[in-house]
Amino acid sequence: QVQLVESGGGSVQAGGSLRLSCVASKYSFSRNCIGWFRQVPGKEREGVAVIHTVLGSTTYDDSVKDRFTISQDFAKNTVYLQMNNLKPEDTAMYYCAAGSPIWGCWDAASSYPSWGQGTQVTVSS
């Protein structure tokens, strides 16, 4: 059974940092890709950062490059999203997802079949 559990969200002021964690079942981790997505009410879920669990390669949305870092810890079956210099526009529900998109890890949310329940990130100005 695929299971993903996120944690680490919260409320911070602009310029602050948070680290999100996604604990994945071993089956989830065996998928090629684990990604972080975010969604605000009324908008589509968008990709933030993804990691290829075998190659270790990463891809980021332009809006978070140089501020966010995705990483993995095989021993803990955990993928992290370190978020620095947070901005109000980063406010969203953050989800981790696992899958094997045909065209590579950086793909639409619909390409990921397994999702966690989400963790809220709120950044105040």
Image (cartoon, grey):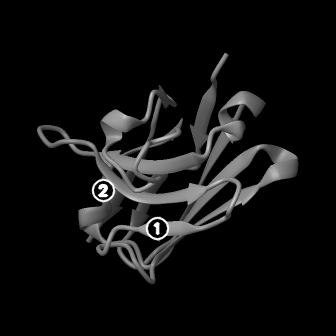
Looking at the rendered structure, the kind of residue marked 1 is Thr
Q: Quadrant of residue 2?
A: top right
Residue placed at 18% from the left, 38% from the top? Answer: 41
Q: Is label 2 in contact with label 1 (beta carbons under 8 Å)?
A: no
Q: Is mark 2 on a helix, strand or loop?
A: loop
Q: Quadrant of residue 123?
A: bottom left
Indicate left or right for 40 with 29 as reference: left
Residue 125: give its label: none
Indicate left or right for 22 with 93 as reference: right
Q: Nearer the viewer, mark 2 or mark 1?
A: 1
**Along the viewing direction, whichever of 45 and 26 lies nearer the viewer:** 26
Badge 2, how many Cα within 10 Å: few under 14, some, many 20+? some
Q: Where is residue 104 in the image (x, y as percent from the top left)?
A: 45, 53
Q: Is residue 48 above or below residue 125?
A: above
Q: Who comes first in sequence, dot 2 or dot 1?
A: 1
Badge 1, how many Cα within 10 Å: few under 14, some, many 20+? some
Indicate left or right for 37 with 6 as reference: left
Q: In which quarter of the image is residue 72?
A: bottom right
Residue underneath mark 2 = 91
Residue underneath mark 1 = 59
Q: Distance between the residues labelled 2 and 1?
A: 20 Å
User: In the displayed image of the protein, which residue is found farthest to the left?
Assistant: 42
